[in-house]
Image: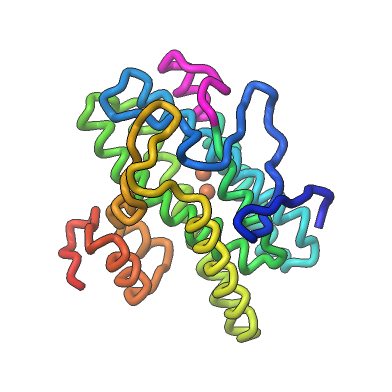
Amino acid sequence: MSGIGHFDVAGLRLRDNPARDACFRLVLSDTEMHEYEPSHPLARREMVHRHMSNEITSLDIAAQCLADFPDALWELRLELARQCWDESRHVAALARRLRELGGTKGEFPISAFEWNVTCALDDLPGRLATQNRTFEAGAMDVVAGLASGLRGAGDPGTAEVIEAILADEIQHVRFANRWIKRLVDEDRRVLLKVVAAIRFLAQANAALQAREGEVNAVGVALADPADRVPAVNVEDRRLAEFTDEEIQEVLRQAGFRSLSSEPAVP
Ligand SMILES: [Fe+2]
Ligand SMILES: [Fe+2]
């Protein structure tokens, strides 16, 4: 593992933040972020800025996997390299949209939580399980709902950028699903690493997620984490090759709220 250090929080050993331009201020918890009420004049710009930052983090994670696991199979390394290219285009597209909205990089705090957790894991299947199969799959749920909301609010420009990104994200989730399945089929012990990674992520969420009623840095009261689970993007999760059983489990966690036209039957 390369020379990026670690820090401890609530008994967990997380990876130190990645390098960022001096204009950015990195924070660790939701309460330090500037997520505004939807009606606030800065809400859309902050949202675009936050997604731009998350794309930088996705790029960093995929690139760090290439650096940390030089002996991974070539086809898997190729997928990660392609992901780096996709994520760099996502950053550029959102940076352009941010400027069109009058924003500048660094104007809001950012978090690299996904990096802090994922890059603390020292095995590649565990990283694919957290970053691609959990964080990016969760982002597919968020982004699909966001795009339709943006269109409804009269902002097709931002909706188009986000929908174009979503098309790439499906592949990032799909290749992780395929490779985890293949690696588990080849060696059942890999399943233990995947389970350990998901448990580690749950512990990190429990330690750092804002509790119901906590207030963020711009005075917005945050909802219970369970109520912040987005409606499930069933169609894209199918395209990303989640099984029916896995989709049912995600639906259950989301209170059976679905973005699909299909009925979300328990
Ligand atoms: Fe992306
Ligand atoms: Fe991605």
Which of the colour schemes (rainbow, by chain, secondary structure, one colour) is used? rainbow
Decide which of 52, 38 is in the foreground and name it: 38
In the drawing, does residue 102 fall left or right of residue 144?
right
Decide which of 103, 94 is in the foreground and name it: 103
Q: Identify the residue shown where x is 57% and y is 23%.
A: 106
In this rendering, the answer to whether 80 lies above or below 214 is below
Q: Identify the residue shown where x is 55% and y is 56%.
A: 131
In this rendering, the answer to whether 9 lies above or below 20 is below
Residues shaded magenta = 93-109
Query: Magenta stretch: residue 96 in it?
Result: yes
Q: Identify the residue shown where x is 63% and y is 46%.
A: 84
Decide which of 179, 31 is in the foreground and name it: 31
In the drawing, does residue 213 fall left or right of residue 79?
left
Query: Residue 219 at what x, y percent from top left?
Result: 37, 28
Q: Quadrant of the C terminus?
A: bottom left
In this rendering, the answer to whether 157 lies above or below 221 is above
Query: Residue 248 at what x, y percent from top left?
Result: 30, 71
Query: Magenta stretch: residue 26 in it?
Result: no
Q: Is residue 175 visible?
A: no
In the drawing, does residue 42 fall left or right of residue 124?
left
Q: Is residue 219 visible?
A: yes
Query: Residue 229 at what x, y percent from top left?
Result: 33, 53
Q: Identify the residue shown where x is 55% and y is 33%.
A: 110
Q: Quadrant of the N terminus?
A: bottom right
Query: Residue 168 at what x, y percent from top left?
Result: 48, 48
Decide which of 119, 259 is in the foreground and name it: 119
| Number of residue marks | 0
The residue at the far top in this view is 102
The residue at the far right in this view is 3
